[in-house]
Amino acid sequence: MKTWKKFAHIDAKTVDEAASILRTGKAALISGGTDLLGTMRFEILPSYPEVLVNLKSVPGLDYIKEEGGMLKIGGLTRLEDIAKNNIIRTRYTALAEGAHRTATPHIREMGTIAGNICQLPRCWYFRIPDNRFNCIRKGGKTCYAMLGDNRYHSIFGATKMCLAVNPSDTAPALVALNARIKTNKGLIEAEKFWDMAIPGSTILAVDEIVTEIQIPTPASGVKSAFIKFAIRKSIDFPIVNCAAMIGAGNARVCLNAVYNKPYRATKAEEVIKGKSIDEASADAAGAAAVASAKALPGDRNKWKIPIAKAMVKRAILACA
Amino acid sequence: MSEEEKNKSGEQESKEGSGHISRRDFLKDAGLVVGVPAIGSVAVSAETAATQAKTGAAAKGTAQSAGIKSAAGPVTIELTVNGGKYRYAVEPNWSLRQLLRDQIGFTSPKDWCGGQGACGSCTVIMNGRPILSCMTLACECNGAVVETAEGIAKTKHPVIQAYINNNAFQCGYCTPGFVCTAKALLDKNKNPTEADIRDALGGNLCRCATYQRHPPAVLEAASKLRGEA
């Protein structure tokens, strides 16, 4: 097994202490570590952190509670705890199911919700060991997926020339549930949280740390659901996934793994909003969701479009 | 437990198996001989870290970078593995799997996928959670309670015999990981359904594809634990 190159390790006592070390620019934040340690072991990035700042040593960041009309989840809460939580399973179903379908039981026992929404893309050019493709996402000049094998890549075009998709299973659930992400610097709407960064996946500043997820408690009668398409039931990253929250005259539908960031299917929302959910209306919403989807030149990822349509349809039907 | 006591307990273990050297013991002993230079390398790396600390502090001159550099050396941790207490100076870049196998000598956490967290062969139970020891930093395990397949076998947990009864393995390489995951499930859920078991074991791969035999094995262990069979 490849061992990690040397690094220093600091157990942070407070979020502020962790942020001040991150500000040096030579540090990386570790919580569950299941994404970070993989990128480090295989040296997929051009730079290697000199120091890891452990956030797990900061007390009071692991909790799930309903308070003041919203659900609050601490950034360090393990995905398995979210997936098994009865409050989340009944009232915030999309998130429970998204957390449950993430990776494997072991990784869910280790991985945190904050880490899951900040994870790096799985594009195979980006992830190749020893940074053999110094792509645009790493500060290079080219997207190798553009002319290469892009069967799992974006069906809604590039973002700043990057075709990688966001692989999170909890992210679309958070967008559908209209969550807000609290950091040490403020509150960010889930929808605006993600963006193509070098090499990140979020709009977070270098010393910004996710501390809490806040989800407004849905009104009674509002249902949410999450559907994932992957080759295996466990382990795999999504090929396409979709979360929806429908009821009380409103609808929010979000696809993921189809675009650089979670893709809110506003056209599908318009179709289904206020309508009764049935086979025909869900199908129409699915078709609307992918109306502007376009396969990349060579049609290698064309197969994802009907899957995205079906995922939207099934997520909506699951909210009936 | 001091280094001396640890050595003593090691002696006791080898006495128990006196007169018979198993293939496993032979490999472990051979590994120890090869392992000697590794201890030297720890000392060397500590030295390098000290040099780095000097040069680093001189170059930056800030308290911040000095703090980072002083964190570069080995960290002393204490942890409980299979009921025994251990104290080790670990480098920040050691995985828990490395500590368990190469230093302490519990060789059941296996490496298959090369440390990607994709196969479950290195599963151990840490603080009640089945986790991947290859994706866990040893220096973050201070105070942890760890259980490996060796510990589960030592306590004569019914899951071991159930796996044997059901032939739930072929080559056996992935088995310690499966056993740890199954035991962690049974600790939390005394009456799992087949669906629960399939879900819990979803992160363990078996190249021999004995998947169909795992649920009956875990169901049998569960009924034994409930005192039914």
Image (cartoon, grey):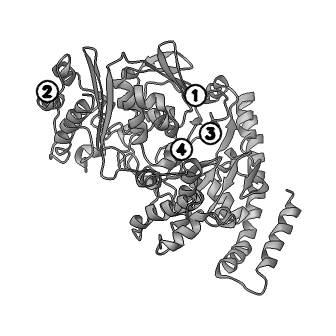
Which residue lies under the disc numbered 4? A109
Helix, strand or loop under label 1 = loop
Return the residue nearer the eye: A262 or A312: A312
The chain containing the residue under callout 2 comes to A
Which residue lies under the disc numbered 1? A63
Instruction: Answer yes or no: are tags 3 and 1 on the same subunit.
Output: yes
Which mark is nearer the camera, 3 or 4?
A: 4
Please tell me which of labels 2 and 3 falls first in the chain: 3
Residue positioned 72% across, 39% down in the render = B69
Measured in 3D between alpha carbons, the distance from the residue under mark 1 to the one under mark 4, in whole angstroms, is 14 Å
Please tell me which of labels 3 and 1 falls first in the chain: 3
Q: Which mark is residue A281?
A: 2
Extreme residue toward the front, this view: B228
Q: Are marks 1 and 4 in contact (CB under 8 Å)?
A: no
Measured in 3D between alpha carbons, the distance from the residue under mark 3 to the one under mark 1, in whole angstroms, is 23 Å
Measured in 3D between alpha carbons, the distance from the residue under mark 2 to the one under mark 1, in whole angstroms, is 38 Å
Query: Where, by quadrant of the figure, is residue B110 drawn?
Result: bottom right
Which residue lies under the disc numbered 3? A52
Q: Decide: is B83 above or below A257.
A: below
Instruction: Answer yes or no: are tags 4 and 2 on the same subunit.
Output: yes
Instruction: Answer yes or no: are tags 2 and 1 on the same subunit.
Output: yes
The amino acid pointed to by label 3 is Leu
Q: Which image quarter is the C terminus of chain B in?
A: bottom right
Q: Are marks 3 and 1 in contact (CB under 8 Å)?
A: no
Q: Which mark is residue B210?
A: none
From the top left corner, tell me how far across and down residue B222 is, in percent.
54, 58
Instruction: Answer yes or no: are tags 1 and 4 on the same subunit.
Output: yes
Helix, strand or loop under label 4 = helix
